[in-house]
């Protein structure tokens, strides 16, 4: 069949130059559909590929036997498909083949042999890829810079796997999750003299602070550290670790239940480059306060959700020490009150994103000053009422997203004020707001042209004709 949409007659080199300036993830898929020439060019330029079950039907066309019976390949990716794909995308730099349950070490071998420039590989939930296959990738993919693995060490760590790290000299990012590792493995990684800048060992078992400390001692240039779920960590061990983290910009200590505010404030003082901290569901707030001189930190993103002991005193100290905060999540912190939230909003004038969902200690919210930077407010299940919404409408005129799910006290009057004054508002969630009815959706869509997504109150019913009318105004209304 003749192509109906032919691109302009330009040399392939010109098109390559144009396409190289575009975002691959957003542009290449649509460009590849224009013509066979564009498909060929985008395949040649593509540096990253994610393979999921939805791409399996396309991969089945790579069957090397040339069979026309593709039914047996339509639901999963095969080693043969990966082999043929890797032979055609020889300049591939990144591939994510997570969740493909039927590929084996053969796929890893094909990628290692055919894609010499491969620098990043993600192998999560691939049950038939063994430690031997992972070791092969580490030893033979010379440009490998980043690898993400899970489920290793079950039932035990393979010797070839442990020895392979010594060959991966260019490895700059190692992500291990849901695995049984050991202090021995951490020591081998430490002694491999890698180029490691990012280390993630989240939800892993069978290791201790001794192994972590030895590894940090050898890699004092780490910028990214994820120890989520390492519930053996204590304030004392973290204070020691801070001596080896002068370049740290990101840390995740979520679900480390023994850690308190002492760890957070030590990190704040000892890590001058730190910008992103995740300490969800720890034990911040139980510590006895000591006179600790606080430095002004560079922290911009802070996740303290699920800290049942977090109190106003602690949060106010956070606000004083983190004036550059742009994102704060204190959802599910029942002891926080409106007093501390107001202090945060007053001190952290750059705050763009605030989450206070299910903070049942907040009985009201008084804002009598402008918050021009605030763009996202998530307050699910809170006691925000029409009065609070009126203050938000007056103070947060740059608001883009508002989540009021299960806010039982808000009515048409309060929502109407937000829609009237927040002229940039793009998304609003009103699910389970029992005091609101169907009519609020049309009011919002026709009053505020910037709206792009509305989650209506439960029980809202709209015909296809009504939904299409909302879409013509640029707004998608979800199922209630």
Image (cartoon, grey):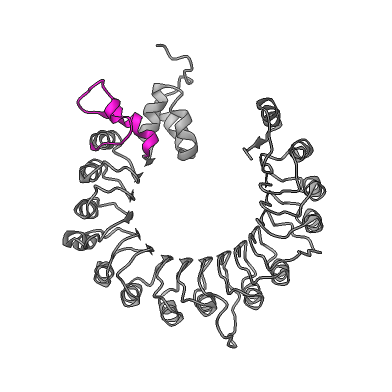
- Front residue of this view, candidates 350 and 329: 329
Relative side of 12 to 456, left or right: left
Quarter where residue 361 is shown: bottom right
Query: Residue 74: x and y, percent?
Result: 32, 29
Name which quarter of the figure residue 180 lies in: bottom left
- Is 114 or 377 nearer to us in this picture? 377
Q: Is residue 94 visible?
A: no
Q: Is residue 270 above or below residue 18?
A: below
Task: Report the quarter where the C terminus lies.
Answer: top right
Question: Looking at the image, which is closer to me, 94 or 148?
Answer: 148
Query: Number of callouts in the render?
Result: 0
Left or right: 356, with 167 as reference point: right
Q: Residue at x 22, y 23 (%)?
A: 66
- Residue drawn at 39 percent across, 34 percent down: 54
Instruction: Find residue 7 and report its horizontal and vertical position in percent.
Output: 47, 21
Q: Hey, which residue is sitting farthest left in the picture?
A: 159
Q: Residue at x 23, y 22 (%)?
A: 67
Q: Is residue 270 magenta?
A: no
Name the residue nearer the viewer: 314 or 116. Answer: 314
Determine if residue 182 is in view. Answer: yes
At a point 72% along the width and 40% down the height, the residue shown is 450
Which range is magenta? Answer: 52-79
Figure quadrant of the N terminus: top left
Give the answer, above or below, for where 274 lies relative to 178.
below
Magenta segment: does it hold 64? yes
**Would residue 306 appear left or right of 188 to someone viewing this image?**
right
């Amino acid at each position: 069949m003749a192509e109906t949409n032919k691109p302009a007659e330009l040399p392939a080199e010109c098109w390559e130059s144009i396409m190289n300036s575009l975002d691959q993830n957003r542009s290449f898929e649509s460009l590849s559909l224009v013509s066979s020439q564009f498909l060929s060019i985008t395949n040649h330029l593509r540096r990253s590929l994610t393979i999921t079950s939805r791409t399996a039907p396309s991969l089945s066309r790579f069957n090397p036997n040339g069979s026309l019976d593709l039914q047996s390949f339509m639901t999963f990716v095969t080693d043969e498909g990966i082999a043929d794909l890797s032979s055609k995308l020889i300049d591939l730099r990144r591939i994510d083949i997570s969740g493909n349950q039927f590929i084996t070490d053969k796929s890893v071998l094909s990628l290692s042999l055919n894609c010499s420039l491969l620098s990043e590989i993600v192998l999560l939930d691939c049950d038939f890829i063994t430690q031997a296959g992972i070791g092969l990738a580490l030893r033979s993919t010379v440009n490998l810079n980043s690898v993400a693995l899970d489920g290793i060490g079950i039932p035990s760590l393979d010797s070839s796997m442990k020895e392979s790290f010594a060959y991966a000299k260019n490895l700059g990012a190692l992500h291990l999750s849901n695995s049984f590792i050991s202090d021995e493995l951490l020591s081998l990684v430490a002694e491999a003299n890698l180029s490691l800048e990012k280390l993630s060992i989240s939800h892993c078992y069978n290791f201790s602070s001794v192994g972590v400390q030895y590894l940090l001692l050898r890699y004092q240039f780490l910028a990214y550290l994820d120890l989520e779920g390492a519930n053996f960590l204590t304030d004392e061990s973290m204070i020691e670790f801070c001596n080896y983290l002068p370049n740290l910009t990101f840390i995740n200590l979520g679900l480390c239940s023994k850690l308190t505010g002492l760890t957070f404030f030590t990190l704040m003082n000892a890590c001058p480059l730190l910008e992103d901290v995740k300490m969800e569901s720890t034990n911040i707030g139980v510590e006895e306060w000591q006179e600790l001189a606080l430095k002004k930190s560079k922290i911009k993103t802070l996740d303290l959700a699920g800290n049942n002991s977090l109190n106003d005193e602690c949060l106010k100290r956070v606000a004083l020490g983190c004036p550059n905060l742009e994102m704060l999540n204190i959802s599910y912190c029942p002891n926080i009150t409106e007093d501390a939230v107001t202090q945060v909003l007053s001190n952290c004038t750059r705050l763009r994103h605030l989450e206070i969902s299910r903070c049942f200690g907040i009985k009201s919210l008084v804002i009598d000053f402008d918050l021009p930077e605030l763009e996202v407010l998530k307050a699910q299940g809170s006691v925000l009422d029409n009065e609070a919404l009126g203050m938000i409408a007056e103070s947060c005129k740059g608001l883009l997203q508002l989540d009021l799910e299960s806010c039982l006290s808000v009515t048409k009057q309060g929502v109407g004020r937000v829609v009237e004054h927040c002229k940039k508002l793009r998304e609003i969630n009103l699910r389970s707001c029992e005091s609101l009815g169907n009519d609020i959706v049309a009011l919002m869509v026709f009053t505020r042209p910037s709206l792009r997504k509305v989650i209506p109150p439960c029980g809202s019913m709209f015909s296809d004709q009504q939904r299409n009318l909302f879409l013509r105004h640029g707004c998608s209304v979800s199922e209630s």
